[in-house]
Image (cartoon, helix red, strand yellow):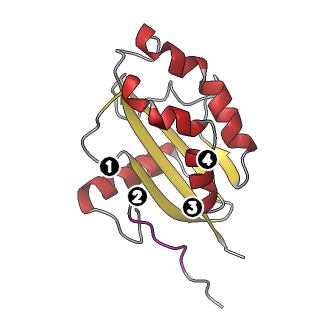
Amino acid sequence: MSKYHLAEINIAKMKGVTINDPIMKEFVDNLDLVNKLAEDSEGFVWRLKDDSYNATNLNPYNDEQIIVNVSVWENIETLEHYMYKTFHSEFLRRRKEWFLKFGKAATAMWWIPKGHIPTLEEAVEKLDYLQQNGPSQLVFDLRNKFPAPKQIA
């Protein structure tokens, strides 16, 4: 049994000027459904949310066009199942309708001790580190995955 969980951050730059821009309406209309689907998924542990039940109002980059998501999962497999094998995959497939190409890593993953909840600042630091240094055991992306740290007996 692993003593680690997987934390992840992903960011996206919206085509809309803000989340309330009409071009974002279909994405926003389905946000609660997609978030609930995550929370009900096997392996889901936690996700960042504010008083509106999502994280779209959080603005760590001081850019109204960038939205952020941070979540914790039991492992990579459960995160990938949610991403690619549920209704969420429809939104991944259609992301170009709502989001601009970011140009650098937009998703970062890292292993955390079970019970740790990452802060938004910690998640932003991990993504920045990945963008500057590339994937490693410290922080990685979906194309370059690293296993959880070895258990110390």
Q: Say if mark 2 contacts mark 1, CB within 8 Å.
A: yes
Disc 2 element: loop
Task: Tell me the CA gap for discs 1 and 3.
Answer: 18 Å
Quadrant assignment, res 100? top left
Which of marks 3 and 4 precedes in the sequence? Answer: 3
Which of marks 1 and 2 precedes in the sequence? Answer: 1
**Does residue 145 belong to the magenta stretch?**
yes
Amino acid tagged 1: Ala
75 lies above or below 83: below
Q: Say if mark 4 contacts mark 3, CB within 8 Å.
A: no
Query: Pointer 3: residues within 10 angstroms few (<14), some, or many (20+)?
Result: many
What label does residue 76 carry, if any?
A: 3
Query: Pointer 4: residues within 10 angstroms few (<14), some, or many (20+)?
Result: few
What label does residue 141 carry, if any?
A: 2
**Does residue 143 belong to the magenta stretch?**
no
Q: Provide the residue designation for mark 4.
A: 85
Which of marks 3 and 2 precedes in the sequence? Answer: 3
Q: Provide the residue designation for mark 1.
A: 105
Which of marks 4 and 2 precedes in the sequence? Answer: 4
16 lies above or below 135: above
- Expressed as whole percent of the image width and height from the top left, the position of residue 45 reads 69, 52
Task: Tell me the CA gap for discs 2 and 3.
Answer: 11 Å
Which of marks 3 and 1 precedes in the sequence? Answer: 3
Q: Quadrant of the N terminus?
A: bottom right
> What range is drawn magenta here?
144-149
